[in-house]
Image: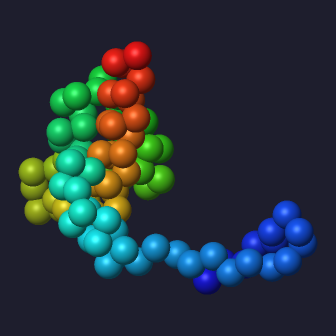
Amino acid sequence: MISSKAPSGDILHARIPQPHHWRTLVAEDERLILSPEEFLSRWAISKQQLARLCFCSPATVSRWLSDCASHQEPRDEYKFRLGFVDGLWSMKQCK
């Protein structure tokens, strides 16, 4: 848990979302999931910008996009973030 102060001065204990929290969220709506490759095909951003959106390192993004032995699948929480950002950015375009 992470401690933080509420506006009233009381200490709050915020919980860190665990993988099962992300899976539950995604199970509710598959549209919230977007792979890094899909996201990059929809939006003209760099790998560094993608890393900033996902709060991870550019090296991690490179492993996601790699076709070699160092390939790593992104966790659900990253795919959710990309789906969420895609939804926000898509709504902005429609207005």
What scheme was used to colour the molecule?
A: rainbow
Left or right side of 55 for 69: left
Residue for point 68% across, 81% down: 13
Residue for point 27% across, 71% down: 23
Left or right side of 29 for 9: right
In the image, residue 62 sits, relative to residue 69, either above or below, namely above
In the image, residue 6 sits, relative to residue 80, either above or below, namely below
Residue 8 appears in the rendering: yes
> Camera-side residue: 64 or 95?
95
Residue for point 81% across, 71% down: 5
Residue for point 74% across, 78% down: 12
The image shows residue 94 at horizontal and vertical percentages of 34, 18
The image shows residue 53 at horizontal and vertical percentages of 44, 44
Residue 72 appears in the rendering: no
The image shows residue 22 at horizontal and vertical percentages of 33, 68
The C terminus appears in which quarter of the rendering?
Answer: top left
> Camera-side residue: 7 or 66?
7
Residue 24 lies in quadrant: bottom left
In the image, residue 25 sits, relative to residue 20, either above or below, namely above
